[in-house]
Amino acid sequence: MQKVWFMPAKAEEGEQALDDKVSKLFGEAEGFIEEDDFVSLKIHFGEKNNTGHVKPGYLKKLVEEIKGHKGKPFFTDTNTLYKGERSNSIDHLNQAYEHDFNPENLGCPVIIADGLLSKNYSQVEIPGEHFDRVNVANDILHSDALIGVSHMTGHPAACMGASVKNIGMGCASRSGKQQQHADVNPSVDWDQCQECGQCIEWCPVGAIEMIEGKGAKIDQEVCYGCAECVATCQFGAIQVSWGGTSKALQEKMAEYALGALQDKRDKSLFFNFLIHVTEGCDCYNTAQSRVIEDIGILMSKDPVALDEASADLMNERTDSQFLNELYAENDLDYKLQLEHAQSIGLGSREYDLIEP
Ligand code: SF4
Ligand code: SF4
């Protein structure tokens, strides 16, 4: 049985009230931050025009609390696989600042953990079923403690986006994101290819050759789907594959989360915000309306128990399998990620809900 703390909350209470609640919850989990610890606050800053993401105003006291323990907090995320406002560190930082995640407002730095073009990662060995090693962003890997701050959303492929997804997908390099999203290898669109040769330089197994006058060509027999070339091509010529099943995607997310947390099992904490829950994730570049009344903020040291408890609360409030019904047309089931997460040792689905 893992402890999950819960405080009812609504956005209408205002940012200061929610900031107080986060601080109160954090008080229940004290004791895992030590002097000089680098503390990653792993969050999604929200794509341009997205309004559902967790607001910086909810997290100011949390930063102060970490500093009070003499930790060194920083907000962080990794670059996206898709082309948008967060697919390289410069655009990503600018977007974070635009949503008021900046040192002046929050009192701590913002660091994009996988580097300018998502090449700053290391391979972590895991006992997974899909992977025996995963590509985790170095600045998250090298931090001493991690606090996941997740906005609960639906997701058209994963069904649920909460802590497991925030850590699994969100701590991965772009190549790691590609590995989670697809079971097939990338291919080159010759109409877009500028024949610059960068992808050939970066491919670790020499799977790419240049066909003069046409473009780069990937040998599918040699390619093992690492997606370095997708991350490298600045012309959008190497197409991202989105071909995997929801089950595989969810299981792979859980395995990546296992890798990201491997050396931080006693040094991590997770918050889920069931505030302005939206049908799609915070990568949507639109203002989405909420699909369920605000429920509150949950916190746990176990991301699996936390996601289970969060989904259960939504199910109870609606007397339904809420997220599954949201994506009934796609026949999705959010429980797949939790089942797999538990089976590989990421956490437990059993929890005690505690209202402090
Ligand atoms: S990096 Fe992109 S543009 Fe350059 S050769 Fe490769 S596919 Fe073509
Ligand atoms: S996915 Fe990896 S192995 Fe395959 S062509 Fe691209 S860089 Fe090479």
Image (cartoon, rainbow, N blue to C red):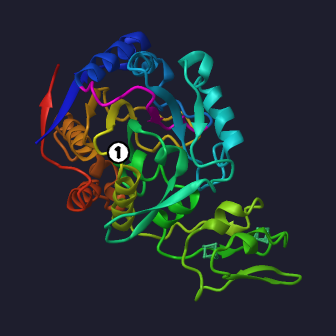
Labels in figure, total: 1
Query: Secondary structure beneath disc 1?
Result: loop
Taking the image as shown, residue 228 lies to the left or right of residue 191, namely: left
Can residue 325 be seen here?
yes
Vertical position of residue 87 compared to residue 329: above or below: above
Q: Quadrant of the C terminus?
A: top left
From the top left corner, tell me how far across and down residue 238 is, in percent.
69, 69
Q: Residue at x 66, y 82 (%)?
A: 207
Taking the image as shown, residue 103 lies to the left or right of residue 116, namely: left
From the top left corner, tell me how far across and down residue 143 is, in percent.
47, 40
Q: Is residue 40 magenta?
A: yes
Quarter of the image for residue 230 reads: bottom right
Vertical position of residue 93 compared to residue 57: above or below: below
Q: Residues within 10 Å of mark 1 (few under 14, many from 20)?
A: some
From the top left corner, tell me how far across and down residue 283 is, in percent.
53, 44
Q: Which residue is at the far right? A: 213
From the top left corner, tell me how far across and down residue 110 is, in percent.
59, 31
Q: Quadrant of the N terminus?
A: top left
Quarter of the image for residue 90 reads: top right
Span colored in magenta: 29-47
Q: Amino acid at mark 1?
A: Lys
Between residue 355 and residue 334, name the one nearer to us: 355
Q: Residue at x 27, y 24 (%)?
A: 30
Q: Main secondary structure of the magenta part?
A: loop
Q: Residue at x 29, y 53 (%)?
A: 334
Taking the image as shown, residue 66 lies to the left or right of residue 204, namely: left
User: Badge 1 is on which residue?
Assistant: 264
